[in-house]
Image (spheres, helix red, strand yellow):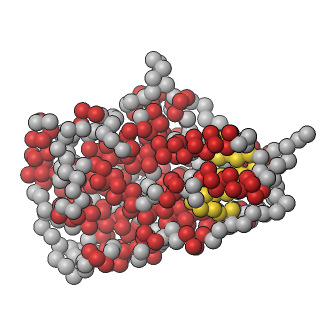
Amino acid sequence: MADDTPILYWFRRDLRLGDHEGLTEAGKTGRPVIPVFVHDEVVAGHGAAPKWRLGLGVAHFAETLEGIGSRLILRKGTALEVLRALIKETGAGSVWWTRAYDPDGIARDKKVKSGLSEDGIDAQSHLGHLLFEPWTVETKQGDFYKVYTPMWKSVRDRDVPSDLPAVSALKAPDAWPDSEDLSKWNMRAGMVRGADIVAKHVAVGEDAASQRLGTFMGHRIADYAEARDRIAEKGTSNLSENLTYGEISTRRCWHAGRRALADGKAGAETFLKELVWREFAYHLAYHTPRITSANWREEWDGFPWKDDERAAEIKAWKQGRTGVQLVDAAMREMYVTGTMHNRGRMIVASYLTKHLMTHWKVGMKWFEDCLIDWDPASNAMGWQWSAGSGPDATPFFRVFNPATQAEKFDSNRVYRARFLGELFEDHGEEAEDYFEAIPQSWNMSIDDSYPEPIVALDEGRERALAAYKNR
């Protein structure tokens, strides 16, 4: 007899209908499909900004599903327990999802798959949010890649299947299970008043992601190789926010980039390389999960980084009050927009780990709380790359000079004026928004005097180099 039991389709970082392999296959079975989102143990551990932004994505995706005659069932609790309860309520014979590749996601999914399989339930995981699953990319010696460039060369000409058309209908069950009220989860709680400021800058959902991709391909990709470093310009795709929640597939972005490359657009290869850099982060998170929690290079375990988050220097870094203009502007961009230009991320990370001799974990944790495009693999690898303790890392003796970086990438001071209201009379609206977004307990005002540097740049550099030589 044909199986007509419902399939529970468990959504996570894949909030889209287009190019969704597992969901497409579920629809083709002809069985009822019950979309589910679980506020589970992994979601509960998210920082303030990513949890809030995930909630926006879930709400938007629920509306998208209603548009094709379906629903998104919301439940809160431990993933395995919630799914077991839904199976009992609905008579579902299968639970399907897209794979996770980060340590926390893998641990949760293994527990779910093992438990459901023991229950006699068909538990299937499908292609996730990567182009190349980590175990399919190997060196000639059969090992995983530890350096980016060889990995790029090994995958750049690989055949990537075409992206799939959007799912347009899903068979409904005879009766829908109850759904919880998303608003009662209060996923914006950690954002406090900052949510209203950052909300001006979000672009939620599949349509918004498609629009971003189209704008980038139509107007920016040709100059991307150079423009992506000019911190005041709109030279990037801004797709990191949408890729984080699976509101657009990496595969779709890849094919758009390949078409641009074929059309002779100079920046296309650089864009494709950035997509593979993200793949490299997950490749490493899968093969060496310690990258998200410990020094990837174990010889750095004895390095004398500071980690007292109560220290005045660390507090000044978090508040964008170091007295180093480009560092402070970049930190404030994060509080106002929920994201930070990639050049800014490298500069503030280098400054924290080298000039301030602070452990990369402190910065990684702070970004995890503040970024709406927080990604567990990319965040960890980015911080370890900047600190020097990670794979393919920038050498510790390479210390970004924020003053030189400002001259090179913000020579007209547009970026700094956009965010540093105490220093620039011609400041942008975002400079004032910063003071509306930050915690009131910081007791800061745009009328405050801008601080002197907490550490002289040459002094901080020499201190870092001395520590490196003596490690």
Q: Nearer the viewer, residue 45 or 449?
A: 45
Please indicate whether residue 96 sits to the left or right of residue 416 in the image. right
**Quarter the N terminus occupies:** top right
> Residue 441 is drawn in which quadrant?
bottom left
Q: Residue at x 77, y 51 (%)?
A: 92
Residue 2 visible at all: yes
Q: Residue furthest top?
A: 141
Q: Residue at x 71, y 42 (%)?
A: 119
In the image, residue 356 lies at what x, y percent? 17, 53
In the image, residue 465 lies at what x, y percent? 12, 41
In the image, residue 90 lies at what x, y percent? 78, 56
Q: Is residue 345 above or below residue 444?
A: above
Please indicate whether residue 88 sits to the left or right of residue 144 in the image. right
Residue 207 visible at all: no
Q: Nearer the viewer, residue 60 or 79?
A: 79
> Residue 193 is drawn in which quadrant?
bottom left
Q: Nearer the viewer, residue 104 or 272?
A: 104
Q: Residue at x 68, y 39 (%)?
A: 118
**Quarter the C terminus occupies:** top left
Q: Is residue 36 above or below residue 319?
A: above
Q: Is residue 157 above or below residue 108?
A: above
